[in-house]
Image (cartoon, helix red, strand yellow):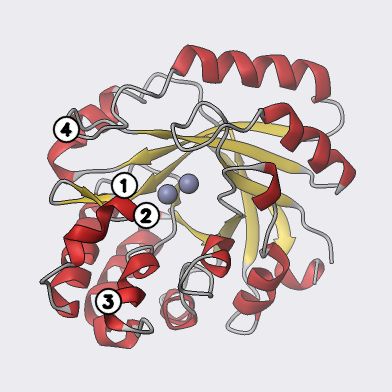
Amino acid sequence: MKIIEDLHLHTHISKDSKQNPEEYVKEAIKRRIEYLGFSDHLDLDPTDKDYGYYNYENAYADYVALKKKYGKQLNLLFGVEVTYQSTLKDTVVSSTINKPYDYMIGSVHRLEGFTIAGVRGLPFFEGKNEFTAYMAYFEEMAKLVDLNYFQIIGHFDVIKRFGVQFYGKFNAKKYEGIIRSILKVLVKQKNVLELNSSGLRQKPMEPYPSKEILEIYAEEGGVEVTIGSDAHSIKQFGYGLEETLKYAKSIFDFELIAFVQKKRVKLGKISDFV
Ligand SMILES: [Zn+2]
Ligand SMILES: [Zn+2]
């Protein structure tokens, strides 16, 4: 199987990664990945301990230097993963609007002051029932999608990353109402759902999003996806991409796309590669 793209990678520009970006590029050329995108964390909440770590100038400088060196061998893309918070939506826009990102991934990482996508977010779940915890997440995701600002919607059900530890296997069917209404908007706006393989190396042991969610996406007319391994180190780079593509294809033969300067590039259907 050919892996044509990986658009979700963290480098030393992200606080939770020490990875030199050049190693990803060299490895991607070896693996014949054609579209490779960096998507470092941009955290905008002053109460978050990761706040202020992202350095745009350094991120862009890394990208420009690597593009110059390797740009003939693969399409290197400059992305960002923005931690969306509904209370900070003006800051989300003002911090990114004039930057030359090829694409922006919008992700919900924080709820009620906790980083729920990370291990330090565990207290968010303590003493909460499943419904309350998951609905808080999907309500925030609804607001993220309503903003209609991000090309790519990151790891749509990442709340299950630690949710499974408290409530057992995630069953998206229980939240079908809100999930369907979010995906309807997402499809109408032509935002793109991300297939994120990192769930396979984490507690859920399945990709983000779950099959049930991909099913609803397809039912609502969603056709396009991007794929990313959400690697924070070279060891994690590309992990589970193949399995994730097969997983998605068992629901629908989605179309893989990339974004270059926020414009779509159609790469082909999953069946063209699997
Ligand atoms: Zn994320
Ligand atoms: Zn990420």
Residue found at x 79% / y 42%: 28
Question: Which is more toward the observer, 34 or 184?
Answer: 34
In space, the residues marked 4 and 3 are separated at their CA atoms by 26 Å
Q: Observer-nearest residue: 94 or 129?
A: 129
For label 3, the crowd category at 10 Å Cα-Cα, with few meaning under 14, some 14 to 19 and many 20 or more, is: some
Say if mark 2 contacts mark 3, CB within 8 Å. Answer: no
Q: Secondary structure at mark 4?
A: loop
Q: Amino acid at mark 2?
A: Gln
Q: Position of residue 16 (x, y in %)?
A: 46, 38
The quarter holding residue 90 reads top left
The secondary structure type at the circle numbered 3 is helix
Q: Secondary structure at mark 2?
A: helix
In the structure shown, which secondary structural element does the residue marked by tag 1 occupy? Answer: loop
| Eye-nearest disc, 2 or 1 | 1
Q: Residue at x 73, y 67 (%)?
A: 242
Distance from Cα at disc 4 to Cα at disc 2: 32 Å
Residue 266 in sight: yes
Q: Amino acid at mark 4?
A: Thr
Q: Position of residue 7 (x, y in %)?
A: 61, 45
Q: Which residue is mark 1?
A: 148
Q: Which residue is mark 4?
A: 47
Pointers 2 and 1 in contact (CB under 8 A)? yes
**In the image, residue 195 above or below residue 93:** below
Residue annotated with mark 2: 189
Q: Position of residue 73 (x, y in %)?
A: 86, 32
